[in-house]
């Protein structure tokens, strides 16, 4: 194989985690050649540098090499398990008013997340469920957001199960508009370590659907993805894989549970001891490792800042290990201490968004000038789709700290979801500009370990998605 093509495949494999065998896979070969031709480039090395610098061209290539095959109510037993076993279990454990966070992590053209929204609605808990739907293919995400489908998306028993939540439209079908408030579509590449993260909303999930995507990854990527999905679940949270996906019990300490007519995975409610297979960034950073103006006193971050307070250090460790109960024990009586309060809010957020937001609202009243609490409040309000209040909280955060890249990024997400794409573009550009000034591996304050290079990439992806460019 020519060296340029090998480099192209290596780049592709690195960015997607895909198991690629160029020599043997004619479909892959044809797909890559089609994408190169569409770009109007004849030289493979030129094409490689083109896709490295042009997100839209890279997406175009991805659309050629990924399979977006999906349909409504695929594996109906799993959707039934969600309705009859998983949702009732979550609500009986966390309380009837708990906001259930569901993540459809390779949602393709949307049939899966819309089916999840329909299943929640017919289980009588539609308004209590928030579905985050992500995929690496921007083209698929755009189709998903449109919510219009052809008959092919309704194979098998699908039509019957969608009931009145799918309407006949010109040339096909249209999802009921009332479902839109439950589902948010975002770009996310499972092969990169951008999750769990507050910034991407991939934390404290009650349920994750990750079906028919692991099969495309190489073994190393599968293991890394599975460990990160484990970390993205709140204790007791559920992971649903397709029946044809590989078994993952050896990759993270999941329990295998029989749920109705199928098997699903579950993160244990109590973690006995931190598992060696579940690695969480625990490296402590000191203030002076951040890049600041000379006169700047430095930004505090409750999750990483060095502290002489033994209880706070223990709470930081417990949070890194996902032991939210322990964090609560250590911090609940310390509401006068902003770090302790921020750790408590983060632990609550891993368990229950509604309660975390309520506690955070009280906390920001008590410590209005502590930017981490304002930031956490903006994230929680965003998660609850309370965009106006979320925007206010994000703007307060940026008032306190105008160079906070993650604050600008979050404001961009809020404005994008509110439909204000021009304003969102400005915020994503601000985030990008701040990240560009930093070495790519710099950890961004308050961001759960997100690095400048990665956040820059995410901001660029959002800019491309809203068509704002950089
Ligand atoms: C076969 S579809 C699965 C759709 C749906 N989950 C289902 O089971 O019906 C696979 C999807 O995975 C997406 N995908 C592939 N690699 C990905 C990655 N690295 N990160 C996120 N999504 C990815 C593809 O774009 C495609 O939409």
Image: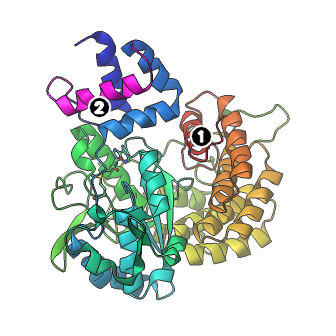
Residue 211: in sight, yes or no? yes
Mark nearest the camera among 1 and 2 is: 2
> Label 2, on which residue?
31
Q: Check residue 296 for magenta coloring.
A: no
Residue 196: in sight, yes or no? no
- The residue lying at 33 percent from left, 13 percent from top is 4
The residue stretch that appears in magenta: 21-42
Seen from the viewer's position, the closer of residues 152 and 113 is: 152
Task: Count numbered badges in the picture.
Answer: 2
Q: Residue 307 placed where, x, y %?
A: 64, 51
- The residue lying at 85 percent from left, 35 percent from top is 295
> Label 1, on which residue?
285
Label 1 environment density (alpha carbons within 10 Å; few <14, some 14–19, many ≥20):
some
Seen from the viewer's position, the closer of residues 372 and 189 is: 189
Instruction: Write down the quadrant of residue 286 in the picture.
Output: top right
Q: Secondary structure at mark 1?
A: loop
- Which image quarter is the N terminus in? top left
Seen from the viewer's position, the closer of residues 327 and 184 is: 184
- The residue lying at 26 percent from left, 45 percent from top is 222
Judged left or right of residue 81, residue 35 is right
- The residue lying at 47 percent from left, 18 percent from top is 49
Q: Residue 442 placed where, x, y %?
A: 59, 33
Judged left or right of residue 245, residue 437 is right
Q: Secondary structure at mark 2?
A: helix
Instruction: Write down the quadrant of residue 88 in the picture.
Output: bottom left
Q: Is residue 426 above or below residue 54?
A: below
């Amino acid at each position: 194989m020519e060296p340029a093509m090998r480099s192209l495949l290596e780049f592709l494999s690195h960015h997607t985690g895909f198991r690629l065998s160029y020599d043997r896979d004619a479909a892959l070969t044809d797909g890559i050649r089609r994408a190169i031709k569409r770009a109007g480039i004849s030289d493979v090395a030129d094409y490689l540098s083109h896709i490295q610098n042009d997100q839209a061209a890279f997406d175009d290539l991805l659309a050629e090499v990924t399979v977006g095959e999906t349909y409504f109510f695929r594996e109906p037993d799993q959707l039934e398990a969600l309705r009859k076993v998983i949702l009732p279990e979550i609500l009986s454990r966390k309380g009837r008013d708990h906001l259930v966070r569901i993540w459809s992590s390779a949602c393709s053209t949307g049939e899966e997340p819309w089916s999840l929204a329909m299943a929640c609605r017919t289980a009588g808990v539609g308004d209590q469920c928030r579905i985050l739907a992500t995929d690496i293919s921007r083209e698929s995400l755009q189709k998903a957001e449109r919510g219009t489908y052809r008959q092919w998306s309704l194979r098998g028993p699908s039509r019957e199960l969608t009931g009145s939540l799918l309407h006949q439209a010109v040339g096909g079908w249209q999802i009921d508009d009332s479902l839109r408030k439950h589902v948010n579509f975002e770009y996310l590449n499972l092969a990169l370590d951008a999750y769990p993260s507050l910034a991407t909303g991939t934390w404290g999930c009650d349920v994750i659907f990750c079906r028919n995507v692991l099969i495309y990854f190489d073994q190393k990527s599968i293991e890394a993805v599975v460990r990160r999905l484990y970390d993205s679940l709140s204790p007791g949270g559920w992971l649903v894989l397709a029946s044809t996906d590989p078994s993952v019990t050896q990759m993270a300490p999941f329990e295998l549970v029989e749920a109705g007519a199928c098997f699903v995975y579950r993160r244990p409610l109590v973690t006995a001891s931190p598992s060696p297979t579940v690695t969480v960034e625990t490296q402590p950073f000191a203030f002076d490792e951040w890049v600041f103006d000379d006169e700047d006193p430095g930004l505090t971050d409750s999750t990483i800042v060095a502290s002489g307070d033994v209880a706070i250090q223990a709470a930081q460790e417990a949070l890194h290990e996902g032991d939210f109960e322990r964090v609560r024990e250590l911090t609940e009586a310390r509401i006068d201490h902003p770090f302790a309060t921020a750790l408590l809010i983060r632990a609550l957020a891993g368990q229950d968004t509604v309660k975390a937001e309520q506690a955070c609202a009280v906390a920001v009243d008590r410590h209005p000038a502590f930017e981490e609490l304002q930031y956490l409040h903006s994230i929680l309000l965003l998660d609850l789709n309370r965009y106006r209040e979320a925007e206010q909280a994000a703007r307060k955060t940026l008032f306190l700290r105008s160079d906070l890249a993650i604050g600008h990024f979050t404001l961009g997400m809020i404005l994008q979801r509110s439909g204000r794409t021009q304003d969102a573009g400005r915020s994503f550009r601000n985030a990008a500009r701040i990240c560009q000034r930093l070495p790519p591996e710099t950890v961004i304050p308050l961001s759960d370990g997100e690095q400048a290079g990665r956040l820059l990439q995410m901001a660029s992806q959002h800019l491309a998605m809203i068509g704002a460019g950089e």
